[in-house]
Amino acid sequence: IIICDEYENFQELEIIPLNTREGNIPLIQVIDDDVSMLIVLKDALEEKGWMVIACTEPEKAIEQYFDLHPDCIIVDYHLKSNGLQLLDEIHKLKFVPTIMTSMDYNREIRMDAFRNGADDFIQKTVDIEEFIVRVNRQLQRKQIFDTTVLLDELTQVYNRRFLKEIFNRSINELERSKTPFSIALLDIDLFKNINDSYGHLVGDQVLKSFAQYLKENIRSSDYVFRYGGEEFALLFADCNDKEAVDILSRILKDFSQHVFNSGTDRFQITFSGGVFFVNDPHVSLTNALKSADEALYKAKEQGRSRVFS
Ligand code: GH3
Ligand code: MG
Ligand code: MG
Ligand code: MG
């Protein structure tokens, strides 16, 4: 198959989680050049409440796939320009479960499908009920993958691995539509004292509350990541450093009013933050974080409980 030029150098494994899409409704892509079959499958999937993008052309399929990030792909073995090859291309690009379908159910075809990375193989025309159950199983696998690979276990915000992915996406956006963004690093002040005074479990509880508070107080286009121990990173879409400092200073002011209860004592916490404005697409994540960290260091040095850029 022919793949658009712009995707030719795309080598990195791309991971797009379910929960970046509104409503969390699974999106399934069906690729089949038999239009009547396409309609049957599409109707069955939609009846289940899932969203479906259907297409007959492999070239179109790759494009759709990059625009919409489906959670499961169902591809026909006998596509005009070879369903196997399409499967192979897809698996080079990212983790997404794939189901191969075929009118035939012979051993060679099935083995071909699995050798090329299919996660399941379903014969057409299938029992629709079984088809739905098997698609559902693949969607569950995708969900497990998304949550275990991308989320920090303790705080349930995104982890550091996903920061890289979102940074790259934001850089693309900056190149494409000149939308700059800001990156922030936050570090809880004197957190060691919390652990030392009240124990690690209370410390963990503080980390969870802090992460949750951040999540609830940013826009839906912004992201929170646990960067390490008691450090968090934020990415503010379409936002300059001054605006990001203002947002974070407001969050700091409100959060530091919150009174924690250790069981025996009451205490409050503050954090320090550093912000870096990314308006040049050639900036690397490493350098952006380094600059944010320098601003954070300055905030710590000048007495903590403040945010600098
Ligand atoms: P500063 O204001 O300079 O940042 O002081 P600090 O005490 O916050 O900094 P320091 O780096 O000395 O201590 C961070 C502490 O965070 C030490 C470490 O034990 C604790 N920590 C890291 N990860 C976790 C975690 O997952 N749970 C708990 N409870 N503590 C953690
Ligand atoms: Mg620290
Ligand atoms: Mg420290
Ligand atoms: Mg700290």
Image (cartoon, helix red, strand yellow):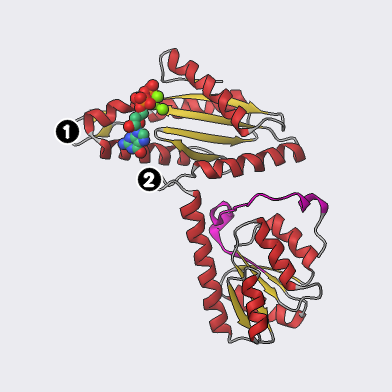
Quadrant of the image for the C terminus? top right
| Above-or-below relation of 233 to 33 | above
**Residue 301 horizontal/vertical position (percent):** 44, 14
| Above-or-below relation of 13 to 276 | below
Amino acid at dot 1: Thr
Q: Earlier in the sequence, mark 1 or mark 2?
A: 2
Q: Residue at x 58, y 31 (%)?
A: 183
| Above-or-below relation of 11 to 207 | below
Answer yes or no: disc 2 within 8 Å of ligand 1: yes
**Residue 147 horizontal/vertical position (percent):** 47, 54
Q: Residue at x 49, y 45 (%)?
A: 158
Which mark is nearer the camera, 1 or 2? 2
Quadrant of the image for the N terminus? bottom right
Q: Which residue is mark 1?
A: 264
Task: Give, as a single range, the part of the protein colored magenta.
Answer: 5-29
Amino acid at dot 2: Leu
**Residue 138 horizontal/vertical position (percent):** 54, 69
Query: Is 24 within the magenta?
Result: yes
Q: Secondary structure at mark 2?
A: loop
The picture quadrant for ligand 4 comes to: top left
